[in-house]
Amino acid sequence: MVVRTSSSPSTPASAPEVAPARALERLREASPLTQCITNAVVTNFTANALLALGAAPAMCDIPDEAGMFAGIAGGVLVNLGTPTSEQRDAAREAVAVGTPWVLDPVAVGALPVRTALAHELLEARPAIIRGNASEILALAGAGAGGRGVDATDASEDALDAARSLATRTGGTVAVSGETDLIVDATRTARVPGGSALLTKVTGGGCALGAAMAAFAAIAEPFDAALAASAVWAVASERAASGSRGPGSFAVAFLDELAAIQPADLEGRAELA
């Protein structure tokens, strides 16, 4: 897995402000409280992934508490996988507080309730938007969405859409795929590698959004998204190497998140 970064033609290339290795050190030193308003299908896996990584998860997602809790959390995830009416109200409360937050626009495009909510939440300027290529294209108004939660587009297809969203929100957009793209208004990073078995485990991508929220508590959005993607790639590659299939992979992936060390990320950045 190699991280490659490039900048826009008018902007000199520069190294990330906080390299992935240092970001992982800082996360484990701080153990940031990470609030997850997330998909009901993935709460357990997401919480376990955050614990393994070194963060402190909290699934506080009910109205009249979500906003209060966001005020003490270091980072917030808003995942639209199962947007019940209570979760929608909780999300509105949480993003209004000002804590760095991640929007995961699950299955936006064809489904009207979550699509309308995603566009509403964009006005609160998420620090990071994380989705697959089809979700990012749909959110930017350049596509109709994928097949449910599955992308029908490659990550590179969403580069312009990601840049547009990043410019609009002033934040970072992370496009997950065979090669992850991390984009803000002036920079682009690519994180190839990882294991396809992540797509066979419920919560692999959703938990990545939560990890980005945890990293956003201790690093700027671009660096947070880059660190989380790099960690996910390394941990999933290692987990896959000793797994027989999705079941053993899921367990091994949590183990690898706990075992990964900052030194494992050193030397994996190739900067333009």
Image (spheres, helix red, strand yellow):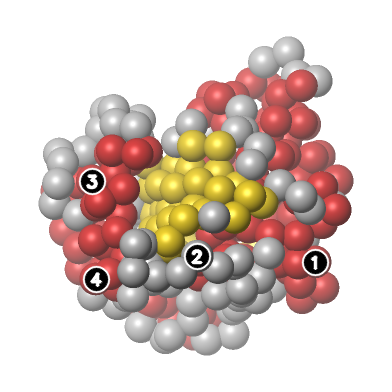
> How many other residues sit within 10 Å of disc 3, few (<14), some (14-19) or many (≥20)?
many
The CA span between labels 4 and 2 is 22 Å
In primary-sequence order, the first of circles 3 and 2 is 2
* Viewer-closest of 245 and 70: 245
Of labels 1 and 4, earlier in sequence is: 1
Q: Are marks 4 and 2 in contact (CB under 8 Å)?
A: no
Q: Nearer the viewer, mark 4 or mark 2?
A: 2
Q: Residue at x 55, y 68 (%)?
A: 14
Residue underneath mark 1: 25
What is the x, y in percent for residue 129? 39, 59
Q: Is residue 19 left or right of residue 108?
A: right
Kindly indicate the quadrant of the structure image that contains residue 204.
top right
Amino acid identity at mark 1: Glu
Mark 2 sits on what residue?
Answer: 13
Query: Cα distance, mark 3 to mark 2?
Result: 26 Å
Hey, what amino acid is under mark 3? Leu
Amino acid at pointer 2: Ala
Report the residue marked by disc 4.
168
Q: Amino acid at mark 4?
A: Arg
Residue lying farthest top? Answer: 244
Q: Position of residue 180 (x, y in %)?
A: 48, 43
What residue is shown with label 3? 137
